[in-house]
Image: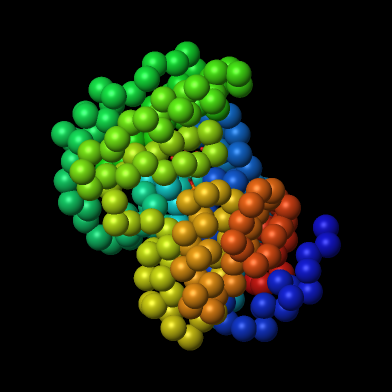
Amino acid sequence: MNLSAPLLALRERPLLVICDYDGTLAPIVVRPEEAVPEPGAPEALAALLAGGRHRAAVVTGRRSAEASAFLNVPELQVVGLHGMEWPGETLHPPDTAALQVIKAALPHAAGMRLEEKGWTLAVHYREVPEPEQPALEAALARITPPPGWEVIAGKKVREFRPSGHGKGRAALQLAARFPDHLPVFLGDDVTDEEAFAALRERGGVTIKVGEGQTEAQHRVASPAEVVTLLRTWA
Ligand SMILES: O=P(O)(O)OC[C@H]1O[C@H](O[C@H]2O[C@H](CO)[C@@H](O)[C@H](O)[C@H]2O)[C@H](O)[C@@H](O)[C@@H]1O
């Protein structure tokens, strides 16, 4: 594993390390409920926090409690639902009427799975036969989200969520809380690009995990390399 010198050298600065969960701290698997962390990831995050010099947080599309349970690092801040759900803050009641409208508009496909997160709805199609996936993506793209809602693309998933949130905002909010730390964002998916764009404007460091087009300045190959980086910084 050959990580670039500029990435390793970041440890000289006090860092605010913000990680996405799926695809970054945990390898992508078929079933979301089976996405356990990459070996060593929780320990590396705990070590980073224990050193006292750096800060760390997770910003995920999952419910905060779910990602926290996977990682089991009690002192780690986990922001859930793409920036809607902050530790210690109570969420307003979910818009169940909008969610009903979205569910009624969904196409049917064998292998399609809904992940209902209370405030957002993820439509997974990883288990839909590959040749049928483009037609399903097109059918999902034809759904007009209710007013005040948007649909976002992810890895074999389309997620309906209230507008006005997103990882870009969440990353900036975290960075504002720790103005003396250099923000570093690691993510693998389309939703992480919002954070890459926002943090680049603020002078942060952005790292894409895995393949695919990105606005990030750096790239690592896999969650295993993320663990190596976290250990190095710690
Ligand atoms: O922001 P993240 O932490 O990356 O969460 C994004 C979504 O991740 C999960 O779905 C993705 O990972 C699954 C497990 O590897 C995979 O089966 C699925 O195809 C991926 O889309 C999670 O289930 C979603 O709720 C998150 O929004």
Q: In this picture, is 90 found above or below 200?
A: above
User: In which image quadrant can residue 209 be found?
Assistant: bottom right
Quick one: 29 or 40, which is closer to the camera?
29
Residue 70 placement (x, y as % from top left)? 50, 45
Residue 16 appears anywhere in the view: no
**Residue drawn at (34%, 36%), measured in percent from left and top?**
121
The quarter of the picture where residue 96 lies is top left
Judged left or right of residue 150, residue 200 is right
- What's the residue at 47%, 41% (across, down)? 153
Is residue 108 visible to the viewer in this orientation of the structure?
A: yes
Q: How is the image coloured?
A: rainbow
Q: Position of residue 8 (x, y in %)?
A: 73, 73
**In which quadrant of the rendered image does the C terminus lie?**
bottom right
**Where is residue 226 drawn, in percent x and y?**
67, 58
Please give the name of the residue rendered at 37% of the width and 70% of the height, measured from the top-left corner.
173
Left or right, 120 with respect to 231, comes to left
Vertical position of residue 64 compared to residue 28: above or below: below
Specify whether 62 is left or right of 216.
Answer: left
Where, quadrant-wise, is the N terminus in this rendering?
bottom right
Figure disc tally:
0
Residue farthest toward the top in the current orientation of the protein: 110
Which residue of the protein is positioned furthest toward the right in this rendering?
A: 2
Choose between 52 and 198: the one closer to the eye.
198
* Residue 53, above or below 64: below
Q: What residue is drawn where x is 32% and y is 44%?
A: 150
- Image location (x, y in percent) of residue 201: 49, 75
